[in-house]
């Protein structure tokens, strides 16, 4: 379990590094974030990638609402993923992984 949590933490650090790299790299050549995003969304694979990203956000939110005991807690965990992305989802997985493993091992989950 700790190895998996460590691997997720490494992925978080790698993603943060990529985000920082993308934020500071060659803005004079490629434009600002909003200008680059406007170009990406004009490309077919850019649209597919963005749609895939948001479908993943929705699936993450569904998982959070299924597994959290309180709707308020679930909303507080699920809503920021729309802004903070998969880094936020990975933080949730690191924190909740032991609980998830226990809940997923129940034979009647998620019908109980």
Image (cartoon, grey):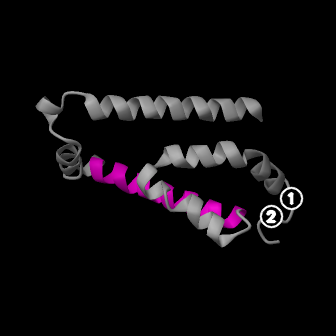
Assess whether mark 1 and mark 2 are in contact (beta carbons under 8 angstroms). yes
Image location (x, y in percent) of residue 91 = 60, 44
Image location (x, y in percent) of residue 101 = 79, 48
Seen at 25% across and 51% down, the residue is: 44
Q: Secondary structure of the magenta portion, mostly?
A: helix
Quarter of the figure that contains the C terminus? bottom right
Badge 1 marks a residue whose secondary structure is loop
Seen at 69% across and 35% down, the residue is: 5
Q: Which residue is mark 1?
A: 106
The magenta span reads: 46-67
**Magenta stretch: residue 54 in it?**
yes
Badge 2 marks a residue whose secondary structure is loop
Q: Is residue 34 left or right of residue 13?
A: left
Q: Relative to the observer, which residue lies in front, 71 or 59?
A: 71
Image location (x, y in percent) of residue 18 = 39, 31
Image location (x, y in percent) of residue 39 = 18, 47
Q: Which residue is mark 2?
A: 109
């Amino acid at each position: 379990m700790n190895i998996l949590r460590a691997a997720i933490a490494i992925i978080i650090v790698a993603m943060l590094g990529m985000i920082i790299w993308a934020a500071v790299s060659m803005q004079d050549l490629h434009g600002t974030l909003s200008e680059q995003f406007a170009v990406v969304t004009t490309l077919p694979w850019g649209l597919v990638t963005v749609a895939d990203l948001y479908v993943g956000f929705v699936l993450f939110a569904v998982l959070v609402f299924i597994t959290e005991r309180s709707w308020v807690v679930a909303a507080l965990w699920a809503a920021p993923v729309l802004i903070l992305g998969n880094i936020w989802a990975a933080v949730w997985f690191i924190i909740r992984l032991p609980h998830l493993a226990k809940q997923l091992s129940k034979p009647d989950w998620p019908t109980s």
